[in-house]
Image (cartoon, rainbow, N blue to C red):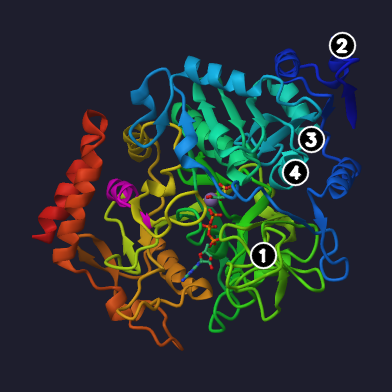
Amino acid sequence: MHSVRAGAYNSDEVLTVTSNEILKQWVDEVRELTQPDNIHWCCGSDEENQQLVNGMLGNGELIELSKETHPGCYLHRSDPDDVARVEHVTFICTPEREDAGPNNHWMEPTEAKAKMRDLYDGCMQGRTLYVVPYCMGPIDSPLSRCGVEITDSPYVVVNMRMMTRMGSAALARIEREGTFVKGLHSIGELDPDRRFIMHFPEDLMIQSFGSGYGGNALLGKKCHALRIASFQARSEGWLAEHMLIVGIENPQGETHYVAAAFPSACGKTNLAMLIPPAEYDGWKVWTVGDDICWMQPGEDGRLWAINPEAGFFGVAPGTSKNTNPNALASLNSNAIFTNVGVTADNQPWWEGKDEMVPVTDWRGNPYDPEVGPAAQANSRFTVPMKQCPSYSDKAEAPRGVPISAIMFGGRRERLVPLVIESKSWQHGVLLGASMASETTAAAIGEVGVVRRDPMAMKPFCGYNFADYWAHWLSFADRSNHLPPIFHVNWFRKDEAGQFMWPGFGDNMRVIEWVIKRSKGEVDIKPTAIGGMPHSSDINVNGLDTDLGALLEVDRDAWSVEMEQIREYLEQYGDRLPNQMLKELDQVVADLG
Ligand code: GTP
Ligand code: SPV
Ligand code: MN
């Protein structure tokens, strides 16, 4: 561990920590601006982690959970006004507003930098400045990219250590490569009115102030691995997506990898580690990633994907031994729980977990169901991926895994069938761009409102969606072995408001069909909106489900939907690729 006292700071000392001049200079500039008491360069060791944990146990930032049931597990209670991502104060700061597009909030870079400078001025007085080098993706993968986060939050440091490859190995790669994303983060005073998440894609730079929560503060995650990376990916010819990566091994030992994009809190973590129904004896599910996927065409023309992360930052509520036993089994040790309740015997608890009764709610008050839930709706667990029983060691493979199918999906109570196959790559891009979903507690704002969320990237694309769709379309020229694209919906409800599809492990039944299609083993029923399965091709043995209703295509309702999609796409004006409207016109014509 390198600890440099700010007072005694001199450039010789920093020289011993890193040979990278740009990094040295940047740390020095930030030190001058923020005026921390101490500077600490993180190496990522167990001892360092323990010291940080001990410090937080001392000041109450962490609370130790039961040593008997949950060794090495801690509870963190965030500020009650700081519990989710803040999209309304998240900005893409490109010189031209048009480059950020109608999908993003935009601020002129000079103005944004000046605003942030004011906020950062002296903000680390009395605090320690942590320098956190990290690598997104396996340390030795050519697809990986590095960054350095400067933060004044030890909670961020211990989370980044689980979520990324953090410490000395990452710093060594940065020194070898020379390039890295610069992320500056301060929790400030946690004042919601002085909270901004700024992105400067052209400078590979992120500046975050005023929040200690998840995607606002763990800068490797959404800020770097999606907003900055999507911008980089466009110029370098790859894709940075809000997708899980799951491997499905059949009883013959053949494994197919599927990448799937669902909006926040719409089922990625669950699908990534599902346990198949009893019928699927001999099948295995392998988790490569649960949130982010970076992919590019390999020499064989297929898309090859890595998960840039090393841990899960998963939604706690609803996680149970019935819905997601693999997640639950990952959480018995070495996990951090943020904003959950606690039982009398000091175990973490959230709604839907089990029959235990919480005594304390997420704010630390005595639990009273009249007041509200024990766990905040967006409460989360942080845990290293390797603790998951379905962890795939392919998550460390430098070249990643080949993708056999891509799935898009949202939370749609009505209209959208259980599964649709796109007619072509181009039509698949339209399917992705047409995604809509009910909003969830993952971001501050109203919950349950249907909004367009193309490719589940609405909050995460670092540039104009019109250019993003053009980039997706361009893959048709980059490769002749692209995976087929599907759209799924686990969330259809009947008149009584009940889910029509059992979901969770039973989603395996749809994935089995998707893989069969990718191998050309079954036919589809062509319709205006895409290929539909023959009912007999989806295994519903043992289920009491009206598959017919789930696969229905309501022509009139779809005509209305297509016009709404057209209206949405037309916002993007001249920049919208023609191909998108061509695909849309074809669907409308086929609907008749
Ligand atoms: P982020 O981490 O925010 O990106 O979310 P995520 O996409 O990983 O979502 P997650 O798997 O954590 O699921 C969020 C919520 O959806 C949980 O409350 C789950 O219980 C619920 N959920 C997940 N899969 C299904 C499903 O197949 N059917 C139904 N009805 N609910 C589901
Ligand atoms: C999401 O909101 O999609 C998440 C959680 O995965 S956060 O890290 O806060 O972005
Ligand atoms: Mn997510």
Query: Element under label 1?
Result: loop
Whole-angstrom CA distance, mark 1 to mark 3, is: 26 Å
Instruction: Name the residue that disc number 4 marks.
Output: 155
The image quarter in which residue 390 lies = bottom right
Quick one: quadrant of the C terminus?
A: bottom left
Q: Which of marks 1 and 3 is in front?
A: 3
**Are circles 4 and 1 on residues that touch, CB within 8 Å?**
no
Q: Where is residue 344 in the image (x, y as percent from the top left)?
A: 79, 73
> N-terminal of the two: label 2 or label 3?
2
Q: Quadrant of residue 115?
A: top right
**Spatial CA span between label 2 and label 3:** 22 Å
For the residues labelled 2 and 4, the Cα–Cα distance comes to: 27 Å
Q: Name the residue under label 1.
A: 390
The amino acid sitting under disc 2 is Asn
Q: Disc 2 designates what residue?
A: 10
Residue 12's spot in the image, x, y percent?
88, 11
User: The disc labelled 4 sits on which kind of residue?
Assistant: Tyr
Label 3 belongs to which residue? Answer: 167
Q: Mark 2 or mark 1: which comes first in sequence?
A: 2
Work out whether residue 297 or residue 368 is closer to the camera in this orientation and state it: 368
Dot 3: element = loop
Q: Does 20 sit left or right of 254 as displayed?
A: right
Q: What element carries label 4?
A: helix
Mark 3 packing: few (<14 Cα in 10 Å), some, or many (20+)? many
Q: Which residue is drawn at 20% across and 44% down?
A: 567
Residue type at the position of mark 3: Gly
Residue sitting nearer the eye, 519 or 32: 32
Q: Are circles 3 and 4 on residues that touch, CB within 8 Å? A: no
Label 4 to label 1: alpha-carbon separation: 27 Å
- Given contact means CB atoms under 8 Å apart, are the residues at marks 2 and 3 in contact? no
